[in-house]
Image (cartoon, grey):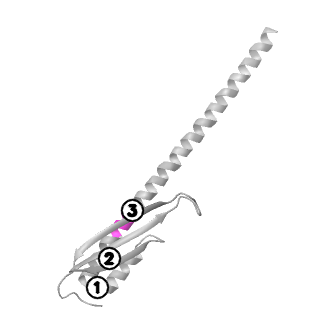
Amino acid sequence: MHSVREALRSRVGRGMVTAELAVAILAALSLFLLLCWGLFLVVQQLRCVDTAAAVARQEARGDRAAAATARAQAPDGARVEVRRRSGQVRVRVSLVVRPFAGGRVSVPLQAEAAVASEPGGMDR
């Protein structure tokens, strides 16, 4: 009877290790996905910043064709707003990012750039 108890105890011990390992793997996978999501957000924010700066620069020069090319570099779904006021060009790029299609959680990203209008800017 003694050996039966030891066999049962050994079996239960192995089952606990397996359960703990499964939980640890799920936790590690969740952390990895969270880090990937964070990296994706950083990349999208940098793309918004680059787009805002490029569009503002080209609009301030008066180069509409180059500004349109710069707008095309914006992330998918981004909204680009251009405002001219008192010798300045202000560009705001806004983007709402969701982790999964139709997800309830969303992260709003925004970048803004302001550049002084260049005198005699070309209008193309």
Q: CA distance from mark 3 to mark 2?
A: 15 Å
Q: Vertical placement of 98 versus 89: above or below?
A: above
Q: Amino acid type of disc 1?
A: Asp
Disc 1, SS: loop
Q: Which residue is mark 3?
A: 45
Segment colored magenta: 44-50
Q: Quadrant of residue 29?
A: top right
Tell me which numbered mark, 3 or 2, is placed earlier along the sequence: 3
Label 2: few (<14), some (14–19) or many (≥20) C-alpha neighbours in 10 Å: many
Mark 3 surroundings within 10 Å by alpha-carbon count, few (fewer than 14), some (14 through 19), many (20 or more) = many
Neighbourhood count class around disc 1 (C-alpha, 10 Å): few under 14, some 14–19, many 20 upward: some
Chief SS of the magenta region: helix
Proximity of marks 3 and 2: CB atoms separated by less than 8 Å = no
Q: Which residue is mark 1?
A: 63
At x 59% / y 39%, what residue is drawn?
25
Q: Is residue 99 above or below residue 2?
A: below
Q: Position of residue 27 (x, y in %)?
A: 56, 40
Residue 25 or residue 116, whichever sits in front: 116
| Residue type, mark 3 in image | Gln
> Quadrant location of the N terminus?
top right
